Image (spheres, helix red, strand yellow):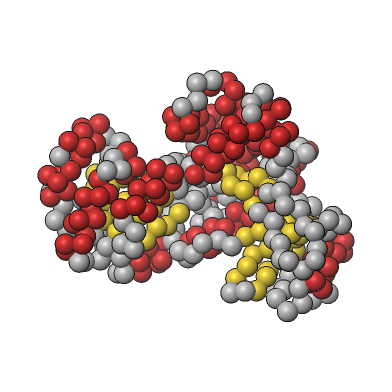
Amino acid sequence: MMIARQMEAAIRAAAGEYPVIAIVGPRQSGKTTLAKALFPGKPYQSLENPSTRLRAESDPDGFLAGFPDGAVLDEVQRVPSLLSYIQGIVDGKNRNGLFVLTGSANLLLMQSVSQSLAGRCAVFTLLPFSLAEAASLLPPGEPFAAVLSGGYPRLLAARMNRARFFANYIDTYVERDVRQLLNVKNTLLFSRFLRLLAGRVGSLLDRTSLANDCGISTKTVAEWLSVLQASSICFLLPPWHENRGKRLVKSTKIYFHDTGLACALAGIETAKQLDRDPLRGGLFENLVILEAMKRSLNDGLKPDLYFYRDSNGVEVDLVEQREGNLYPVEIKSAATFHPDFCKALATFAARYPDRCRAPAVVYAGRKRFVYKGMEVRPL
């Protein structure tokens, strides 16, 4: 079953403006399916295929000559040198919408794109399904079912066994791919690091504590985190700060690009277990922040997301900056609204009266209403 992706309109528009489109993101997020669906008339070549990769590496000119009207080139980070030859072709033809590139390892692909195709390529980051995209595949009105399942298209569309899918995904993609990028020798140590990281979802990231718990150096923590971010496994949410004489917390918060993967790494297997797990709130928060991130990415925009926390402990879970305005969101995993949910929002709005817009609470309940000028929304 082909589920329409919200990014389709932005990619189609960009194909009329740029000679190259790059779709990057985590493994199994649907990049290949999307590229084939949007450009059915273009020949498709996967550089994961050893024989295809050998032809592209040994004779790039001859390989690309077989596609006078461009092609969809899958997993192009496997042959990064190919991008220099693509640059020569698109400069010579002066046509838009020629090549569509996909890649799972953002780190390698983005370095190559920035070096070879600067100004010639529109880059899109495709994450797993948003809640709207997965609506027909998830039980309605059950937010924690969405947290537990995550959004990987194949898992949801094929109704695959969740535990088996994530065990395979972690072993095949997360640990293998990232270990190769990092040249990690100690498999068990890296696996432990991943699980410790999942156990901190939604929390301020203390690199020293993480290093001590894992038995590695803080430098190694920084290196491993950097590649996990570049591989679209996890991301860091920075604090919002503005020089107004207030001392704000400078630490970042850790989240994952898929809550189902975070649950699997944390050993959470069922909705009942999730309901009583200490990570329940952090994982629900993760899902809401992901929705805001996907909304921007699916429009072809760079997300501008933060959290707010001052030295007095006043905290707003999500602050989105758009056109100079600030949109604060408080996120609560409770199914019942309480007026206290709005306290931090009111403080934030009072501190930024000229810029604060549409303060809102997102919670796990089902009613939608306005409380003291603040919208209260179900997930």
In the image: residue 50, left or right of residue 341: left
- Percent x, y of residue 290: 60, 54
Residue visible at 80% across and 59% down in the picture = 247
In the image: residue 147, left or right of residue 365: left
In the image: residue 79, left or right of residue 317: left
Q: Nearer the viewer, residue 46 or 179?
A: 179
Residue visible at 63% across and 42% down in the picture = 148
Q: Is residue 54 above or below residue 106?
A: above
> Which quadrant holds residue 177?
top left
> Which quadrant holds residue 8?
bottom left
Residue visible at 74% across and 59% down in the picture = 308
Q: Nearer the viewer, residue 361 or 140?
A: 361
- Percent x, y of residue 166: 54, 33
The C terminus lies in which quarter of the figure? bottom right
* Residue 59 visible in this rendered orientation of the protein: yes
- Percent x, y of residue 182: 48, 31
Residue extending farthest to the bottom is 354
> Which quadrant holds residue 351?
bottom right
Residue visible at 51% across and 56% down in the picture = 133
Q: Is residue 48 above or below residue 185?
A: below
Q: Is residue 168 above or below residue 283?
A: above
